[in-house]
Amino acid sequence: MSERKKICILNSRLMLGGIESVLIDGLQVLAKEYDIEIICYLDDISDAVLAALPENVKVTYRPFGKGAIAKLLAQIPVLSGQIYKKLLGKGRWDYLLVLRPFLLNAVYAKRAKRTIYWCHNDSYLGFTARPLPLKKRIVKWVRRKVYRKYDMIWTVSDKIAQEMGACFALNNVRALPNPLNCQSIVLRAQEDCDVFFDREKTNFIMIGRMSSEKGFQRVLRFMCQQVLPSHPDAQLYLIGKDTDSPRLRQRMTQYGMADRVCLLGPQENPYPYLKQAQYLLCPSVNESFGLVMLEAMLLGVRVITTDTVGGAYVTQNGIYGCCVPNTDAALQTAVETYLENPDAYNCNLEEARQWAMKFDISYFGDRLMKLLTEE
């Protein structure tokens, strides 16, 4: 019997989140044929994520070299090889799979026969303007040199693969859309939860971390100051990291919305809550994919999102959800329009569900294995 091939996955952390959810789904496929080691340089490792990993996946915490200088050198092409060799240890693998953009220079460590960057962002957009300022042109040139060191780059959609390839003049970019474990999501959505939404009200939900790119703050501003006060039957629920912080609770009290904005915090199983809502708000300022939108479609929840790369792709430019210009005013108008006329946007929920089903992990596995072995 031939020896199983080895994969090293280099990541910063293993906390509950979009990238880690996709990684877990991918590992369920890869672990059947490969021995896998995940190396994290930060010790943020969630017990829930560890419990979800297949048995033959090893997780190692290995911090960068000490000091700011070591971390700086690790980000400089060519000079970073020794730093990443220390981070990766003495291991040798058939494949090195890099998950975060600030780990890209790990390719210079030469610890694997093939190196792959699994790209989950759309940062190439910062380099598409013409003419580019001198500083941007230098950064773009450096990135192109690093990207070309990789045997392959995977992105989350055909659109990003095409545009990233064109931006950096690459021919090694392929699309690997994020998967849904549809059966698991539907089953988990039927589990009990500790909060029951009032079906007599119009319930909006946002799921994600309270970071600037996710756009939570701009929604809270117009929802608390304008929409909720003028629509007493509307309710807003928040799920995700820092959505139950004392500071945020204090702000809701100051707005007079403590009973209208329900702060649910991070949830290992958000699906029973999501299923009870009529609308998912995905107000990202930047979004490369937006898996939660597909999860909402799968559970029969309407989507309101912004015209980001991910928002446009997942809704197919408004066919399977409401996709509005990426402004506060457009988002507010969409929410108010739905409150005043629930049929204002004619989205077929069954067609949206069928679209989400196309991302099922059963298709993802075949695509992943094909890309991994592509010459």
Image (tube, rainbow, N blue to C red):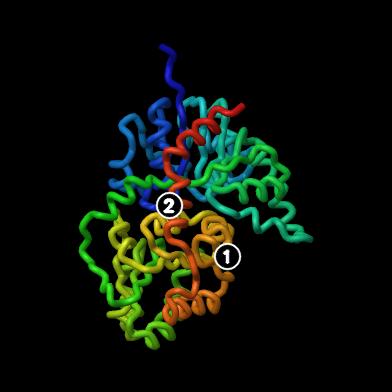
Query: Residue 328: where, in percent of width, then height?
Result: 53, 76
Is residue 212 visible in the rendered image? The answer is no
Q: Earlier in the sequence, mark 1 or mark 2?
A: 2
State whether residue 227 is above or below residue 92: below
Residue 344, relative to residue 26: is it above or below?
below
Residue assigned mark 2: 18
Q: Which residue does the image show at 62% across and 39% down from the upper left?
A: 79
Q: Residue at x 31, y 75 (%)?
A: 249
Helix, strand or loop at mark 2:
helix
Q: Amino acid at mark 1?
A: Asp
Quarter of the image with the N terminus in it: top left
Is 270 left, or right, of 125 in this rendering? left
Q: Residue at x 73, y 44 (%)?
A: 169
In space, the residues marked 1 and 2 are separated at their CA atoms by 19 Å
Q: Is residue 154 above or below residue 272?
A: above
- Who's the residue at 39% across and 47% down the image? 21
Label 2: few (<14), some or many (≥20) within 10 Å?
some
Identify the image quadrant of residue 326.
bottom right
Q: Position of residue 305 (x, y in %)?
A: 50, 66
Say what secondary structure mark 1 lies in. loop
Q: Amino acid at mark 2?
A: Gly
Q: Nearer the viewer, residue 218 or 11?
A: 218
Q: What residue is pinned by disc 1?
A: 307
